[in-house]
Image (spheres, helix red, strand yellow):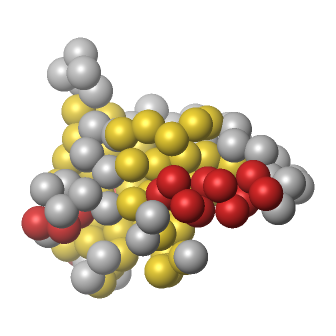
Amino acid sequence: MIKGINHKGFHVVDMERSLDFYCNKLGFKKAFELNQPSGEPWIVYVKVADGCFIELFYGGTEGVKNRAEHICFEVDDIQETAEQLKKRGVPLEVDISQGLALNYQFWVKDPDGNWIEFMEMNPDSPHMRS
């Protein structure tokens, strides 16, 4: 059902400082950016390895816990995964939808309220081209 970890997301207070840390200090590569439909910057993706990213969200505030603070598991079949989790008593907090990067996703929360994303990759997504 789960192929592996696709990404971990963080809200960051200073994008340039974060990119310097992840790219220049840790040696990862900036892969691509996504803007909100309004055109405002939203997320910068840093490639850790093939199929493995860190999402850096703009607008971070110290100590705020929200969906940007999450882990994402890549799956082969988003519909089947959602059905299996529902059968096991895990409610979907956010139903299946197609994101701005063209991938299909849904969200659940763990018992402590941590957000968990499940994603089926679209072959045309920037993730697959990076």
Residue 21 image position (x, y, % from top left): 35, 68
Q: Residue furthest top?
A: 38
| One can see residue 83 in this view | yes
Quadrant assignment, res 117: bottom right
Report the front residue among 107 and 16: 107
Quadrant assignment, res 80: bottom right
Report the front residue among 21 and 110: 110
Q: Is residue 110 left or right of residue 121?
A: right
Q: Is residue 83 above or below residue 93?
A: below
Q: Residue at x 61, y 54 (%)?
A: 82
- Quadrant of the rendering where the C terminus is positioned: bottom left
| One can see residue 9 in this view | no
Q: Residue at x 20, y 72 (%)?
A: 29
- Quadrant of the rendering where the N terminus is positioned: bottom right
Q: Residue at x 23, y 33 (%)?
A: 35
Q: Is residue 61 left or right of residue 46?
A: right
Q: Residue at x 24, y 21 (%)?
A: 37
- The mark total stands at 0
Report the front residue among 100 and 70: 100
Residue 25 image position (x, y, % from top left): 31, 78
Residue 121 image position (x, y, % from top left): 32, 62
Q: Is residue 30 above or below residue 105?
A: below
Q: Is residue 68 left or right of residue 25?
A: right
Residue 7 image position (x, y, % from top left): 44, 66
